[in-house]
Amino acid sequence: MILVTGATGNLGKATINSLLNNGTDAKDIAALVRDETKATAFKSNGIQVKPGDYQDFESLKIAFEGVDKLLLISSSSAIVNRFNQHKNVIDAAGEAGVSHIVYTGFDMKDLQQSSMAEDVQYHAYTTDYLKQMAVPYTLMNNTLYADMIPIISGKNILENGISIPAGAGKVPFLPITEMAEALAVVLTTPGHENKEYVIAAEAAFSFAEIADILSEITGTTITYNPTEVMVYVGQLVQQGVSEDDAAYLSRFAGAIARGEFDTNKSDVKQLLGRATTSLPDFLRNLYSK
């Protein structure tokens, strides 16, 4: 059985859909959820729903019984709690006899030396902990979702232009559906044990280039304004983002500006057997609707 943690989140749901699309039988998929009322669609599709919480070790041990492969989607809890939560999952998986753990890490040039190290170094801690365990692992180091572009680029970017303090930095944005597809491949095919993959597009783009792509798609001029950090935080708050989350996103923008996401690495084509969706095609599909 394959168990997907964080199953009601965006990546969890997309991964379960990818598993179903590649022919995995629903009865061979389990979804770990904190709130079973959010998992009615899984149950109706024949997917086994298992209650469990990253902070509740005993609930994890019970949920992992009979599980062969486990997808550990990184926690979205307070950052200070994330490594200990991941450690709980890994330890419980080891005790339950799980034979393979797949972890969604993060792709940057150097997590420990990043300008936002305090926000992301728990990924490095989790990676190191997994490598010390006897359970075979696979690391899936994800770049930023292409789906985040409308969220982090400013309000109504087709009318107001792109506004983010990302300088000329580039990101190999990848759609969440293709990240999920790569996860489904690793979860259902052999030969991935104790390997590390970069889950990113083959080409990286700056926000100035994204503005040019959108200009071509819409036939109007979309500008790029690498605004100041505090202005950016303020505009996110006006969009309804909490102040803490706005500050968090501003640190991502700073890391982008420093080129920390432009690693020039990608293993997605190798996993999928085809090229990734180009960012222009993704944006064309998103903004031509």
Image: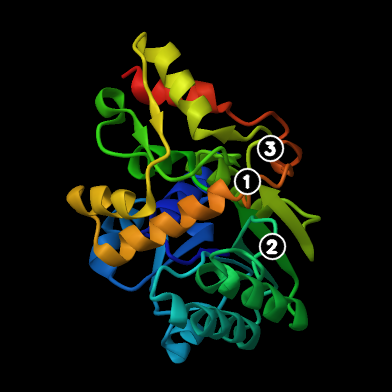
Q: Where is residue 231 in the image (x, y as percent from the top left)?
A: 30, 49
Question: Mark 3 and 2 residues: CB-CB less than 8 Å, in contact?
Answer: no
In the visual, does 228 lie left or right of 172? Answer: left
In the orientation shown, which residue stands out farthest toward the front?
228
Q: Quadrant of residue 286?
A: top left
Q: Quadrant of the N terminus?
A: bottom right
Q: Mark 1: few, some, or many residues within 10 Å (few <14, many ≥20)? A: many
The answer to whether mark 3 and mark 1 are in CB contact below 8 A is yes
Q: In this view, does 131 lie to the left or right of 166?
A: right
Front-most of 275 and 163? 163
Q: In which quarter of the image is residue 121?
A: bottom right
Other-residue count near label 2 (Cα within 10 Å), few / some / many at <14 / 14–19 / ≥20: some
Residue at x 75% of width, y 59% of height = 196
Q: Can residue 193 be seen in this view?
A: no
Q: Which colour scheme is used?
A: rainbow
Comparing labels 1 and 2, the label whose residue is closer to the camera: 2
**Residue picked out by circle 2:** 110
Dot 2 amino acid type: Asp
- In the rendered image, which residue does mark 3 sit on? 272
Q: Marks 3 and 1, how far apart in space?
A: 6 Å
| Kind of residue indicated by mark 3 | Leu
Q: Looking at the figure, which quarter contains the C terminus?
A: top left
From the viewer's side, name the closer residue of 91 and 106: 106
User: Marks 1 and 2, how far apart in space?
Assistant: 23 Å
Mark 1 vs mark 2: which is more N-terminal?
2
Q: Name the secondary structure under disc 3.
A: helix
Instruction: Give above or below for 123 relative to 134.
Output: above
